Image: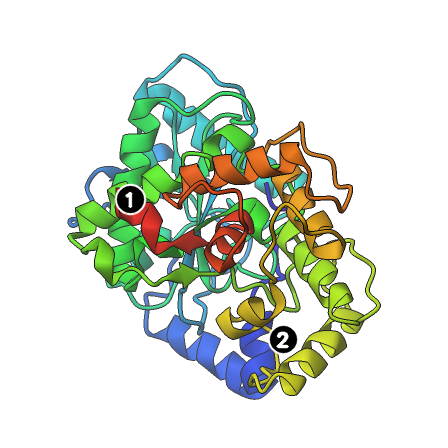
Amino acid sequence: MALHEHEVDRRTLFRVGLGTAVAAVVGTELAFSGTAEAAPSAEFPWIIDCDSWGARPPSSPIQITGNTTNKIILHHMAFPNVTDYSREHAVQLAKDCQNLHMDTNGWADTGQHFTVSRGGYVLEGRHRSLETLDAGGHQVVSAHCPGENGNAIGIENEGTYITETPPEALLDSLVQLCVAVCRQFRLNAWDIFGHWDFRITDCPGIAFYAQFPTIRTRVLHELGVPSSAAPERRWPDIWRFVDSPVVQVGQYLLDNAGYALTANGVFGRDMNAALADFQTTHGIPVTPDATFDTATWEALAPPLDKHATGLPVTALQFMLVRKGYAEVTASGEFDHPTMKAVQSMQHLHGLTPNGKVDLSTWCAVVGGTVREAFCR
């Protein structure tokens, strides 16, 4: 679960300057009711609002971001995998989570926007999350993933899913919630990511993460979007305020391109400078917030096969280990265990399991989505 409250609107502040950003946030705030009280939703009556589950009032005003919501980030709560699937348990879960976030973490309110219990109950997390879902404009500023709190909807799923998978009731409700979020915030199934794509963490868990291609496909079908509409590749858009295993892959690849970086997953000033130089050298527009966009990823990621060696192979192996392929060692040698893991990853994402790492395989390995995953 996230550990920081207000690494939230830096992207707004960085892009448009402090004065304009404050106006954007405050101006959007004024467009909504000034109260933090929750109210049942006529459009989403299956979401239990804060008042209905007995939430404490937030300790400070809840803000609405001026950013555009561009993704959904899924979490597991790292709570026990209980067998009490009742509404009463779900309500207590929401209270326990809010108490943890406010009393232990020192946050203003629950960190995430929504919570899904193992029994399939969906609850509003942070106050005003349901209100802004109804409105479908700008989201509540949250505290579920530093660097993404102002532009990503955070959904916590009860349980711990490193070796176990979530129950069907949870998955069914999660799909329903993701469909609602996508419709209201004009997102799509390929905009669903995991916490560890943007944070150094074990969340959402290896077993849960392996189900993401299926979850995304179910969401796509519920939205009525044809698989042919999916982009060829949707890469994780890491940027200068994100620290994660994906950042570490970027560091390995930049190091391979001639930039001396320490591969530690921390997006520091040295990486920012290296990225800007790489983008300039390759004719890629340089963004002020140092975003790894599609063009950057696809210029950096080299094709790999059984004859490959070096830092790109180490980067690949590092991420495969993170995804649960314990037999792989980050040796820099494209050995047999590495090939078998690549084939498994390709199969999971609907790619031809040939063991060769092309751009689509790279995208799937680092946490992105590929069109083939929706075509099964």
Left or right for 78, reference 241: left
Residue that mark 2 sits on? 290
Left or right for 154, reference 301: left
Quarter of the figure with residue 301: bottom right
Type of the residue with mark 1: Thr
The residue located at (61%, 46%) in the rendering is 2
Nearer to us in this view, 269 or 358: 358
Q: Is residue 23 above or below residue 196?
A: below
Q: Is residue 181 above or below residue 273?
A: above
User: Looking at the picture, how far across and down is residue 271, in whole percent?
Assistant: 75, 70
Residue that mark 1 sits on? 217
Label 1: state its secondary structure.
Answer: helix
Q: Is residue 144 visible?
A: no
Label 2: state its secondary structure.
Answer: loop
Nearer to us in this view, 162 or 27: 162
User: Looking at the picture, how far across and down is residue 124, in whole percent?
Assistant: 36, 43
User: Looking at the picture, how far across and down is residue 89, in whole percent?
Assistant: 39, 20
Label 2, residues with CA under 10 Å away: few <14, some 14-19, many ≥20 = many
What is the number of callouts on the image? Answer: 2
In the image, which is nearer the foreground, mark 2 or mark 1? Answer: 1
Type of the residue with mark 2: Ala
Residue farthest top in this picture: 83
The residue located at (54%, 54%) in the rendering is 362
Quarter of the figure with residue 205: top right
Left or right for 245, reference 62: right
Q: Marks 2/1: CA distance?
A: 30 Å
User: Looking at the picture, how far across and down is residue 375, in whole percent?
Assistant: 26, 47
